[in-house]
Image: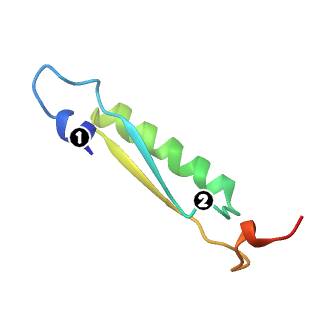
Amino acid sequence: MEGLSLSNLPHYTVGGGVHIVVNNSIGGDYPEDVARAVEFAFKYRNYFRKDIIIDLIVYRRCWTNLHSRSH
């Protein structure tokens, strides 16, 4: 989060950044939607020269713990 705070200081700018937060990275059945969100984020960043955050929320299709499976 310090990066977001520092991005608004004078003489400390890169013209915005794209920050991606992944919540529960198991799942993600819609890669086209993720690609669309990333494309939109870069267009926003390039136009406004500001930071943007993508909060990627995915879910587990089967509510099981993958680490508990026997191999």
User: Identity of the amino acid at label 2?
Assistant: Ser
Q: Residue at x 52, y 42 (%)?
A: 39
Q: Is residue 29 left or right of residue 15?
A: right
Rendering coords of residue 15 (x, y %): 28, 27
Query: What separation in Å lies between label 2 and label 1 (alpha carbons)?
Result: 24 Å
Q: Is residue 3 above or below residue 26?
A: above
Q: Is residue 21 above or below residue 61?
A: above
Q: Residue at x 56, y 64 (%)?
A: 24
What is the residue that sits farthest to the left in this orientation? 10
What is the residue that sits farthest to the right in this orientation? 71
Rendering coords of residue 25 (x, y %): 60, 59
- Whichever of callouts 2 and 1 sits on the residue coming sooner in the sequence is 1
User: How many numbered discs?
Assistant: 2
Rendering coords of residue 21 (x, y %): 45, 52
| Residue of label 1 | 2
Q: Which quadrant of the view contains residue 11? A: top left
Q: Is residue 30 left or right of residue 10?
A: right
Q: Residue at x 52, y 51 (%)?
A: 37
Towards the viewer: 54 or 33: 54
User: Identity of the amino acid at label 1?
Assistant: Glu
Q: In the rendered view of the protein, which quadrant contains the C terminus?
A: bottom right
| Residue of label 2 | 25
Secondary structure under tag 2 reads loop
Q: In the rendered view of the protein, which quadrant contains the N terminus?
A: top left
What is the residue that sits farthest to the top in this orientation? 11
Q: Residue at x 18, y 40 (%)?
A: 5
Rendering coords of residue 6 (x, y %): 18, 34
For the residue carrying disc 2, how many other residues have a C-alpha within 10 Å: few (<14), some (14-19), or many (20+)?
A: few
Q: Is residue 32 above or below residue 59?
A: above
